[in-house]
Amino acid sequence: MTNRLREDNTCLNCGSIIQIRYCSQCGQENIEPHESFGSIVSHFIQDLLHFDGKFFVTIKLLFKKPGFLSEEYSRGRRTDYFHPIRMYLFTSALFFLIFFAFFAPKQGEELVVDIKKNTDTTVVGAEKILPNPKNEDWIFKGMSDKVNQLYSEDDPRGKQLLWSVLDNFFHKLPYLLFISLPLYAFYLKLLYFRKREFYYSDHAVFLIHLYVYTFILLLILMGVTKLLPYIGIGGTGLVYLTFLIYAIFYAYSAMRHFYKQSRKLTILKFIFFNTFSFVSLLLLFGLFFLIAFIQA
């Protein structure tokens, strides 16, 4: 899928006059800057296996100038920067590779699990089971059997089931984040509905840059927390707090720079957006954990 050509023959990237389709100075295609979702996916397929030095320049600008890359992309200035879809794929793959290798819980490690004993359960022998309604269907029965295993201290399958659920859930996290992105873009579209110059894809690209920044920041945080014990420095709680404050300030700065609204209005929309996003994320976490539990 290719965007249609612009009627204006002035290159959006360098300002040169374009004779046919591509700029003779910088090589950028003279197409409409607002991409459709299909066009973004097309770019992803074409560029999936390519990687070049633009990535490091792009990452530097991503941290140095919040919201700048999203603004450049929206304006059609793209040749000098790494494509946001490629950035997302690379950084997310690197993040989850390191997370699963060094930070995700592994079977055999000690877990502290406190399963709340509800008073409304029925006791049969030494086991606790879920209430058994009449005409219990197979889904409820399957989940009931699994909960019985978790409740039973004598059943060795309980710990194995717990690890299976956790492993299943952690490996679904990339899908959870991928699903959350278009939902959050919809929230931004609602919050900035009066800014008609921004298409849905512009909000999505803004979030992709924010996700990429978050992945890299978390990688740095994981590295710092692993390094601190080796150099004899404690206070990981302070490190987490510092990174959290920095991430919040960065996200606010990116939103204000990209959408160009006043501080008060940006703060208000920032609070609304993060509240909606947090609630949605909790619901998604619950849904994905339930799916992981059923599939375990």
Image (tube, grey):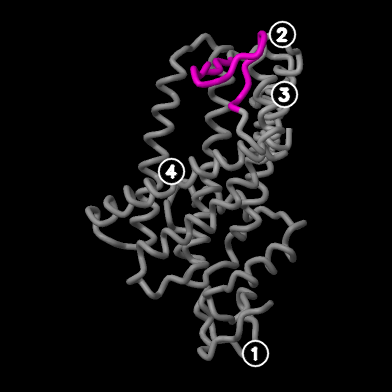
Between circles 4 and 2, the one closer to the viewer is: 2
Q: CA distance from mark 4 to mark 1?
A: 48 Å
Q: Earlier in the sequence, mark 4 or mark 1?
A: 1
* Residue 35: in magenta span: no
Residue 31 higher or lower than 214, as above or below:
below
Residue that badge 3 annotates: 161
**To which residue does mark 2 refer?**
154
Q: Residues within 10 Å of mark 1 (few under 14, many from 20)?
A: few
Asked whether disc 4 touches disc 3, contact meaning CB atoms under 8 Å apart, the reply is: no
Q: Is label 3 or label 2 in front? A: 2
**Mark 2 or 1, nearer chain start:** 1
SS at mark 3 in the image: helix
Q: Classify mark 3: residues with Cα within 10 Å, few (<14), some (14-19) or many (20+).
A: some
Magenta: main secondary structure = loop
Q: Quadrant of the N terminus?
A: bottom right
Q: Residue furthest left?
A: 264
Percent of width and height locating residue 81? 58, 60
SS type, badge 4: helix
Residue 278, label in figure: 4
Task: Identify whether 270 is placed above or below 69.
Answer: above
- Please tell me how crowded label 4 is: few (under 14), some (14-19), or many (20+) other residues with Cα within 10 Å: few
Q: CA distance from mark 1 to mark 3?
A: 63 Å
Query: Looking at the image, is mark 4 or mark 2 earlier in the sequence?
Result: 2
Q: Which residues are magenta?
A: 113-131
Q: Residue at x 69, y 62 (%)?
A: 44
**Residue position for label 1:** 20
Query: Quick one: SS at disc 2?
Result: loop
Q: How many marks?
A: 4
Callouts 2 and 1 close, C-beta under 8 Å = no
- Asked whether 128 falls inside the magenta stretch, the response is yes
- Amino acid carrying label 4: it is Phe
